[in-house]
Structure formats: C-alpha cells, structure tokens
Image (tube, grey):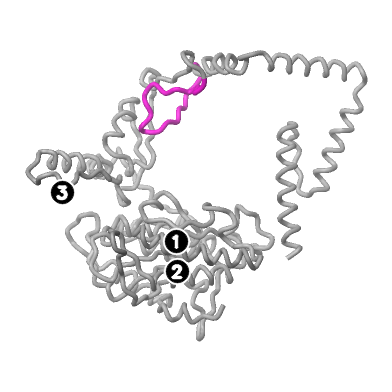
Amino acid sequence: KKYKEYLRASEALAHEIQSLFNDLGISEKFTTLDEAYEILERRVATIYSLDDKDVELSRRTYEDIIRYLREEGIDKNDRDRLMKELRNFVNVVGITCTAEGRTMVDTEGDEDNVYLDVTTMGIDVVIIDEVSKVPFPELLRPILSGKSIIMVGDHKQLPPIYNVKYDKNTVSPDDPIVEREERFKKMYTEPLFKTLFESAPDQSKIMLKQQYRMASQIMEAINRFYGDSLEMGCRDEDKAHRIVIPGKERNLIDGNNSVVFIDCRGSESMQQGSTSFENQLEADVVTRMVNLLEEHCTCDSSGTDIANASESDKMSLGIITPYAAQARLIRKQTDQIYERLRKRGIPSKFRSFGEEKFAVKSVDDFQGDERDIIILSLVRTGKSTFISDFRRINVAMSRARRLLVLVGNAESLEKEEIDLDGQGEPRPVYKEIIDRVKENGGYLSSDDIMEVNE
C-alpha cells in the first residue's frame, strides 16, 4: 500500500515539475526525478554564471515588460490587434454546425469584437464530421459555406434525437399542428446522409472498412449491420483484455472470449409515474460484474501490472442500457460499491479517474464514445421496438474495444426479429449473436455470476 502511495506521489510530483519546466521554457526531457533535479541545478548555475552587466540588462528588460503589461487595457488592445492580423492568415477554421457564419472570436469587449465571417472567406472545402447525428436544418449553414463538401459519418448508427412534442391532451388529432409537427419531425430526424450516400455515384463516396477499435469477436457481432464488410486493421492481440474471472467449474471470462452473454431470467418493471423500464436482476448482475472486474483486472491495456501503470493506460469501463431508469438504478448500486471500497481504503481500478475511465449512460448518450470494457444491460423481457432498432444495437455493441458483456433475457431476445437498414427482411439478430457466443464458450447464466465468491 505504501509503495502504491509512493508511486502516486512520484507521478504527481513529476507532473508538477513538467508544468514548471513548461513555464520556464525548459525543453529538456527527464525520466526520473533525479534527472529533473539535475536539469534545474544546471539552469540555476547558468543564471549565476552571468556577469553583473548581463544580469542588469535582463533586469531592465523584464521591468520594461512588466511595465508594459500593467498598462490599462493593454491585454484587450493586443488581443484585438493580433486577432485582426491572424485573421488574414487563417486557412483552417473549426466551428460547430450551429455557429453563425459570422463567428465571434474575441468574446471580450463591446463594439471591437473580432469576427471570422466564414461565408466571405472563400472556403474551398468544408468537412462535416459525425454527420449522421446532425439534423438536416443544421447542415444547411456549413453546406453553404464551402465550394466542396466532405461528409463523414455512419448512417448505421442513431439519427438526431427529436424531443419536441405537442400536448395530446389539449390538441385535437385534426389540428394542423399535428401534421406540421410530424412533417418537421421527419425532416429533423430523416437520415439525409444515408440518402446521399446510397444515391451518390461510386466516384463520390467511399466506405472505410478497416476498423482499429475493437477485438475481432466484437467486430463479428456488429459486422452483420455492415454486410460483413468490416475488416481488422490491427492485430487481435493488441485488443486483448487480459482479464481472468474464475468460476466454480471453469473460467467465466478469460482470453478466449471478447464477447460474453449473461442470461438473466428476471422481469422488467416500470415505476409509477415513469415511462422508462428497469430490471432489478440485471442491475444486480451488472453490479456484481463491476465488483468482479474491480477484483480481477490486474493490468492495463498494454499488459503492464496495474500497480505500475500510468493513468492514461489504465483500462476503462462503460455500462450502457437503453433505458434511463435502468441507468439510474445501476448508477445507484455501483455508487454503493465504490463507497465501500473508499471506506476500506481500496483504490478503484476504474472510477478513480473520473468519467473518462468509468461511466453509466444510456445508449443514445454513449454514441461517439468508447471504452475498453462495455457492459450492456438490455432490460426488456417482452417484445420491444426500442431494442429492435438495429442502429441502437449497433451503437451499444460497437462502443467496446476489448470486452463486451451482454446482459439480457436470452429466451425473449432470441424471438426479436430485426429489420437491418430497412431492407424489409427481418433477421433474428440477437439469436445469431447468442448462438455465436455459445460456440465460443462465452454463454453464462446469472447464477454463474452471482455465485462467484469475492
């Protein structure tokens, strides 16, 4: 324990020394604290070696700089002058889709703000990233700002969210507002990128097929959404999770499995006054899995012992569910885990580093994010259009890099027929995934997880 405290203190001190080096303009590198101390000693010795004339000249120079910086309004005047100069040399501008064409750069001051007017800059190419999540009205401004447009996105994932609703209790079905609302909703959420991609000539589009995020078993699970066209862009061993969780008769999780399915025969429920589902047994299994991962995750993403691992290389864990109520339930139960660890003085393998390493979110909130380990709680035990949306399934499963743990009711999920990309040919996607997991030896029951001794 003391050694771990020493390592954390050393890492913190090294960070502070690097900040000092940056402030002093010292570019020399160090790997140990002793080396850092030697660099500082040399710098001090250099200063003391200057003769009185050099020191006096340096002193007067610094005094002139201080006097200049203390002049009233000098920071704003310099900023305005420099920004106006820089504006003439800008050839890359980064803005959001909702930013106005005349975008304010300097947010301080009144009438002298500096603007970049992208509509008059003669921009040659506009690149719009994550375009599948951008509503059509928000695409118009960036599209009109350039001579050529490059759209980058994935129409196999979730479209923009439309939350505006009229009050059905006060509005008649014949009211024109109903039709207008439906038309606007369609315009707002219609996957324009999908339409453009499918109708564009071959010379105007390309699909990036090599993926570098996930292990091959995880890629295989989602590849059905891409017509089995995805390919590994890296070695499978580079995406190994290196976690071994022993069970009563065999390992529940080991290096042979990057995708695991835990069959839970619990029941879905809905709290009074809520419109969101939850599943207590699944929440308990997920919580238990977090406990087991905290205990058995012993190395970082590169295989280094976790006691010697840097913060950036430590494994990350995400818990995803389609329903906000289930996310709240799981968050409450995992909070209790980490409170117990804190009271016992045991540092967390994941949560110690904030949301970057540990997060509980809905599927929609997790789009665009990723983690080394993903636990997906599917909640429902009856038929549901919500978890039958192939885009939602794709987003949820494709967040994992090294280990994907699916928690759900196998009997119910195997009955779900899912229309892939609106082709009109429903497939038992969950059954296909579960069957493949069984072949790889990754199929477990909730009892397998709950009966493991801590």
Disc 1 vs disc 2: Cβ atoms closer than 8 Å? yes
Q: Is residue 8 magenta?
A: no
- Where's residue 148, x and y in %? 33, 29
Which quarter of the picture shows residue 118?
top left
Q: Earlier in the sequence, mark 2 or mark 3?
A: 3
Element type at marker 3? loop
Q: Which quadrant, please, contains the N terminus?
A: bottom right
Q: Which residue is mark 1?
A: 319
The residue that disc 3 covers is 169
Q: Position of residue 279 (x, y in %)?
A: 35, 69
> Which mark is in front, 2 or 3?
3
Q: CA distance from mark 3 to mark 1?
A: 36 Å
Closer to the eye: label 3 or 1: 3
Seen from the viewer's position, the closer of residues 38 and 296 is: 296
Task: Kindly check if marks 3 and 1 are in contact, taking CB atoms under 8 A apart as contact.
Answer: no
Q: Secondary structure at mark 2?
A: helix
Whole-number angstrom distance, CA of label 1 to CA of label 2:
8 Å
Q: Position of residue 147 (x, y in %)?
A: 33, 25
Q: Which mark is residue 286?
A: 2
In the picture shown, does residue 97 fall above or below 303? above
Task: Give the extent of the magenta segment.
Answer: 88-108
Residue 453 lies in what quarter of the image? bottom right
- The residue located at (36%, 52%) in the rendering is 364
